[in-house]
Every structure is written in C-alpha cells, then in structure tokens.
Amino acid sequence: MEGRILEVRISVNGVDHQSDVEPRTLLVHYLRENLSLTGTHVGCETGYCGACTVIVDGRAVKSCTMFAVQADGASIQTVEGVADGDELHPVQEGFWECHGLQCGFCTPGMIMSSIALLEENNDPSEAEIRHGIEGNLCRCTGYHNIVRSVQYAGAKMRGESPQGASQEVSS
Amino acid sequence: MSTTSVMGGVVRRKEDPSLIQGKGTYVDDIKRHRELATAFVRSPFAAAAINSVDASAALALEGVHAVYTIDDVRHLGLNPAQVAVGTLRPFLADGVVHHVGEAVAMVVADDPYIAKDAADLVFVDYEPKDAVVDLKEAYADTVQVHDGISNTLLTWAGNAWWEGVIDLPDPSPGIQEAKERDDTVVVSLEMVNQRLIPTAIEPRAVLADWNSGYDSVELWSSSQIPHAVAGAIGMTFGIPSNKVRVVAPEVGGGFGLKLNVYPDEILCCYASRALGRPVRWTETRREASVASIQGRGWIGTSTITGTRDGKILGYELDAICDMGAYTHNFTVAIPLLGLFVAPGQYDIPTSYALHCVVTNKPTTDAYRGAGRPEAAYYLERIIDAFAREIGMDPADVRKANYWKPDQFPVTTQIGLTMDTGDYATNLDSLLERVGYEDLKAKRDAARAEGRLLGIGLSTYVEVCGFGPSALAGLGFSWAGYGLPTAFNGSGVVRVQPDGTCTVTIGTGPSGQGHETTWAQIVSDGLGIVMDNIEVQHGDSLDSPVGVGTFGSRSLAVDGTATYEATTRVKEKAAIIAGHLLEAAPEDVQFQDGGAHVAGSPDRSVAWAQIAESAYQPHTLPEGVEGGLESSVVFSPPNATWPFGSHLALVEVDPETGDVDLLEYWATDDCGNVINPMIVDGQVHGGIAQGVAQALFEEAIYDDVGNLLTSSLADYPLPAAENLPMFNLDRTVTPTDVNPLGVKGIGEAGTIGSAQTIVNAVVDAVSHLGVKHIDMPLRPKRVWQAIEDARK
C-alpha cells in the first residue's frame, strides 16, 4: 500500500488545500508534516491522550486515529485557527488567565475539546466539564485550573466578565 | 499586567501566548533541511543472548541509509551516568539484552514510516535466558542479571548494586531495648511502593545536526539537562564543550524521565556525523514505556516501636529497591535521597537498610519526588497504623514527635542539616481549615449508616534545592558527563542598549514557568516592566553552568543566581543613573521603568536612557566600564527542606471497592513565594501524580519480564473525571540558605499525597479489619481486602 498516492482536498482553518498523500498517512501527520501546522501534537498515537484533537466538520476528533484520506472534503479547525486575528478565543484567554497549562503540550488538544464542549453547552457544570474533557490527558495541572479555564471561557462566551486565577490562589 | 512590584504577586505567564496558540516550539516541531528519521529495533525478551543481527533486508529497502549495531558504536564506550554505581548501558545491546525494549539496532531512513518498515525487516537471532523480575528473587540472587562486574565506582557480587545499611543488620541498641520494654507497642507492615511510568505527554524527541565543516554538533532534545547532555556528547566524541550546542526548547513535561542522558541522543549525533545529514528520532508511546526510565519500585517493611502515649522510640525501614537492568543518571542515588528524608518531621531514633538490586526490567531513576515519596509513604503509613494500634488520633501522634521550631537547624541521624521548619503550626493550620473535628464526626455518622468514609492524613518533609558543592564529594556532580561542575546555578542579567533586559539561566522549564518567575525577580530588582524582560533558557552554550530542572531546585539555586546578578546590575545602574541625575548612587531608586532620586519622583530617568549611556562609555563617569550585565554562579550552602500537611476524605463503595476521592486539602510550606499562582499549579499537579500512584497507576510485568502496561490503555493516567478540585493553603517559613528565602515546590505535592489517600482508604475500612492495601487501590483490590477481612 505504501507506494500508492491519493489526492485529498481538505480545508484547514479556512484555507483550501489539495495534497498528495499515502493512504496510511495519519491526519495528524498530514497537518504537521504536509501543512507545517505543528500546534497539533502527537502524544500516544493510540487515541488515548488527546493531544492531537482537532475539530473536523464541527466535531472534536483525535487526528491520530483518522487517516488524511478520510478527511477528504472535510473542513478542519486546528489550534492555529481559533483566534480571531490578534484576539484570542475565549477558551485560549481562559487558559492564560487561569493558569490552565504548564508544559503546554496537551494544551492545543485540550483547547479544541473545550471549544467543542462549550459550543454545545456554554454553561456546563463542573462535572460536565470534567466529562467533556475526559478524552484529553494532562500530566501537569491535575485538571484543577483547566476546569477553571473552561468555566472562565464559558462565562466569557455568555457575555459575563469572569475573574482569572488571582481570585483563587492561596495566600 | 505590566507591574513593577511583582514579587509574591499573581502574574499571568509569559510562556502562555505562544503555547495557547499552537506556536510553541517542541523538538518535533523543528525541521532541518535534508533530515533523516530513525527507528530502533528493540528486544522482545527480558533476558537473551544475541546470536546474530541480519540487516540485509532492511538495507535493501528503498530510502534506508544505514542500520547500526553495537559493532558500529562499541568504540564510543558506554552510556555515561552521573552516579556510576552499577552496570552502565552500552549504546546498543552488546551480545546480550537485559530488558524488554532494549535497543539492538538503529535504522536511519528518509522518513519515520520507512524507518519503521525497515526496523521490522531486521532479523535478530535471540537465545532467551532466565530473567529475574521479582524483587525478593533478585535479592536472593536466584538469577544473576549481569555476568560480569564492570565500569562502576564500587564492586559488588550478585544483584545488589549498593546497600544503604545504617544500623542494620545490627539494629541500634536503643530501638532494640525499646522493643523489649513492657510498655511499648511494635507495629510493622510490609508494603509495596509500585513501579511507575512517568509518562510526560510529550514523548522524548531528538534531532542531531553534525557540521563536519565546523566540527561541531547541535542537538535538540526534549531534556531537563541540556548541559549534561552536551557534556556527555563532548566526552563521548572527544570534542570540547564549546563545540557542542544542546538545546532543550519547549519541553512537554519532564517529571524526572528527561533527567537522563539517553543512548539515542548520542546515537543520533553519531549517525548525523556518519551520514552528513541531520538525524531525528521521536519516541513512540510504547517505546516511552520501555526505553525511558521508570520510577519507584520498592518492597519494604517499616516498623514503629513506641509507647501507648504516642511517643515513638524507634523507626525501622528495610526495603529492596528495584534498579532495573542498567544504571542511568542517578539510579542508585534515588533510594539514598529517600534516606535523606526517611525520618520525616520527627525527632525519633531510626534504622535503615535499603538494598538496591538489579532486575531484568527497564532502569529506574528519578520520577517526581525520587526516593522521597517512597520514604514518606513507608513512614507515614506506619505512623497511621501505630496511631490506630494505640487508639490515638493520628494528628496527635505526629505532633507528639515533631522537631520543634527552636531546635532548628536540626542535624539528622545521617548528618544532614535541616534549615528551618515549624511543623506543628503547619499541621494545626491545616486541621483548623479543614474543620478536623467536624469532619471526623461526619465520617463517624456516615459509618453508622453503613457508608465507608475515611480520613487520611500525612505530613512530610522534603529535601531539595540541590545543592551544596560539597555534595560533589558524594558523587553528585556532573563529572560523569565530563563537566567539572558541582550542583551550582547560574544567571546572566543583561540590560540591552534599548533598555530592555535579557535574562539567561542555567535551567529551563518543562512547565514550571521559569520565564515568568525569573522575570518577576528581575523586574522587582530593576524596575524594568515585565513585558520588557525576556528569559532565555535551555541552550547549553548560553549560560556558563546549567545543572538542570529537577529536585525542586531551579528557583532556590538558579533563581538565586539571577537575583544576585540583578543586584549587581542594579548597583552599576545606580552609578550611571546617579551620574545622569546628578545624585549619589545610594539615593537612586528603581521602579516603573526607570530610576529616580529618592524623595524626588520628578528627577527621573528612563531605563532606555540609562542603557544608552551604558553603551556609550564616553558618557559614563570616570572609571566606569561600558556595558550593563552580570553573570553569577551560585552555590548554595545547603539544600532546602520544605514541608507540609495533606488531608483527604474518601468514600469506599462496599459493594464494588471503588474509591471516591471526595475532598483534598493541602497546606504546604515552601518558604517565600514569588508567584502564588504558579506555586499552586505545581502543588495541583504534584498531588495528581501522588493520587495517580495511590489509586490508578502501576507498571505491571509478567513472570518473564514483559511489560503488560505499555500503552495508555493499560496504564491509566487519571483523567479530569478522576480528580476533585484541590483545597490549598500555605504557611511560610523562609529558608536561610538563599537570600530569596525560597525552598522549592515542584515535588511537594507528590511526596505528600499517595499515603494520604491510602491512609484515608484504610481508615474507611479499618473497622472491618483491614490493616493495609497495596497501591494502586483499584476497586478489585479494595473489594478483595474487605472480603478477606470479613472472613
């Protein structure tokens, strides 16, 4: 199979791409190697860690469990495409304000899952947030501040004026 | 955001804008022109002789450039180690393999897909041998892992590389006498502190580019210790340190696993030199489970002898510690680190025997806490058992045996000096915040209804911030990597000609927020706004010394170096500003982006003007040299000793054994705090890893040494649904070993938490007759313990 090349047409962050790929090329490798969009990370290659999460036609997908050829004709959003120019997406802002990241490696996937969650329900309970990001593993934060970040982003998306980490830290 | 009075304040991280937009640069994000990719052929056996390696089919595959075996790299020697006690690892297996996953051959090809295809085509003829997996069998020398003795500072026979025996097997007379007294109680438990796989979410990645024209090499590596890697490369290839640049860019989590020099780092340099092209290797998750280091892996018995009023008259710990198949960076020194804190916060007689044995499993080395979580676990579990035995509250037993604040500095039994501590105040602060008495009443009420609620408490003391240069005499130096440096820190502070500032430090973050914290230190000292300070790190050629980010040491050591460098820059800047303002240097104050004369805020000058003068020497006062920078190497007089108290409330489902972690409180004391938001984040993550050990994670091997948990499907990292919010607080007992008064916080959460959870679960089921359950406390194990106790 490895010798065969197929043509795909994929829209990524609003830009149309036409590329030749091997059938076995994973979507995450296509994004990283063919398009140089290295914000989407590879953490486990088995669909457990979620570092490779992107949004495909509106749904959060782990891009290491999908071939590039399966995304033919799809519209994909990666972490590079969520800010509006210089204006951060509320979820990005939440992660910054609430110290929702440490090493940052899981963060792009975590942000994409959080966006997918909040676009479905912008006022989730803590339990709904924890359930919504259960497919994304973080080894640094213990999730405490990630939950806070998503809560911040939800409030922002509802038009409220949330407070960042300075409101909570211990004395 | 741009504030100048920032020490101790919450400041959003400077690191984050790039990371939240997918613009952070990790090793795998870097591309070099004409780079090649690598895959390793790894042993499927834990112990086997290698009869032959046939790479002909792999070499015949289009796009394959080379297949290397030990015959190609034997002349490079062995993979270096800092504490070279035990058997060093060959760069590729040399006629024999000692654990599953050991690299036998290295394939270099046009891309990773071809490299993996080719690796599958390499035929290795193995002759399997008996492997030793169980720790007690290893210690009994039923199978000897290594045939010969070589390349070690010490000599040994059998599988025990090093035995840290203090008082045993001839126990201290005081403890023996206490055991024989009529009024004492002796409580003993054998417990397992299981092997763990550190599991940074970013797998390790390496990219080497050897330029034969300059005869120099650049290596990008996801490492906590770029300077040590550079030293090892220089030593291995015989080139000076100024010809080796090792860069650790963004590092996606470390936790100790990236605190090693690995063969792949050396081998990629070798291949790049041999092939004249850049060579990359990126670890797969399954490789990460067998080819990087693992952590913990002790089986031991702890014993307390004490009176019924809670006074402890002796603490004994006798444990076998799993080293795995080869020595890496610290390996045998990890149990030694545990010994440093084995008596915890207590003024009690102690006696230890730690047996470091080799097994046919991947190497163990530092994993977050590194010996100290193990030590805290054995001590704090047995204190709980002792409290239960004598019917005393576990908090009261602890307080009855604490070192008192006025006893500091305390000299421990093995001769170390603990800097500062106020343990009872810290514990009382926690208990008051928790509402301990009410919580116990709630637990008891629930128990009366048949619900199994449990409260677990643990206190801990950590030793970190390494460390004094004198430790070099104990083998804690970089000499094993060809670098004649002790555990120093370095900081270079430079005011640029435009008045902005660059700070270059000897350690780099793998998530700890160095860029922000260091900028706060410099901003506070110089009054340069945060946005105008850039912190550079992770480049072995940029700072004079870099020991690395581990052992909760960066701030206490490298942070102090930066603080001292800041002070020196400030002294010179005061002379220049005083000259510009026609004032005495001692009257110059720095804040809000410039300097002014004390008491006369209007007489001010901006940093841009001070810098402009500094770089135009003709404008400077007589005798003042041009430029405005300082480079400081700091060697602390001692390590630091943070401490804290943790408390958990759990509920056990009697039908399923499932443990629900309902609440978690921690009151830690890491001395002074620069950025409380970052410190809290470190504690959150640390607790999560301790809870992970207590409830979920275990590296499981079968009888012949196969790792059964080599994917994230089998090795369950906690997800968001598995953890609660954490209730944190602090007490502040500054250290006196550095001028910042800071101690370190990276590992505290992990050291304090695993036994807190186990103590809570055992508390929930102790009235049913359960005395102990080994980690991880998965439902089946808890359910079985309840069932066994009922019989």
Image (cartoon, helix red, strand yellow):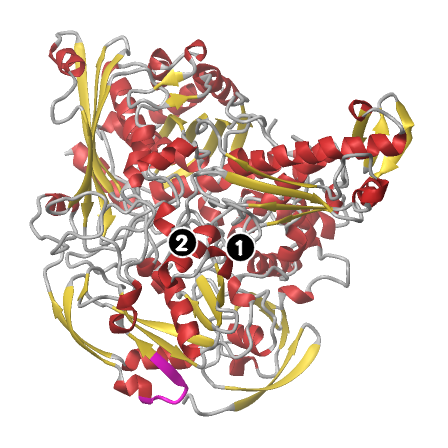
Judging depth in this view, the residue of B613 and B349 nearest the camera is B613
What is the spatial separation of the Cα atoms under label 2 and label 1, in whole angstroms?
19 Å
Tell me the amino acid under the disc marked 2.
Thr
Q: Which residues are magenta?
A: B60-66
Q: Is residue B462 within the magenta segment?
A: no
Q: Callout 2: 10 Å neighbours few (<14), some, many (20+)?
A: many
Instruction: Tell which residue pokes out farthest to the bottom in this image.
Output: A4
Using the rendered view, name the quadrant where residue B114 is placed.
bottom left
Indicate the secondary structure of the residue bearing disc 2. Answer: loop
Quick check: can you spot residue B10?
A: no
Q: Which residue is mark 2?
A: B199
Q: Is residue B69 above or below residue B6?
A: below
Q: Measuring from the top left, give residue B544's x and y in whole percent.
A: 54, 46
Q: Residue at x 57, y 74 (%)?
A: A31
Count of marks, rendered view: 2
Q: Which residue is mark 1?
A: A133
Query: What is the quadrant of the N terminus of chain B in the image?
Result: top right
Q: Nearer the viewer, mark 2 or mark 1?
A: 2
Q: Callout 1: 10 Å neighbours few (<14), some, many (20+)?
A: many
Query: What is the quadrant of the C terminus of chain B in the image?
Result: top left
Of the numbered discs in the image, which one, if any, rests on residue B36?
none
Tell me the amino acid under the disc marked 1.
Ile
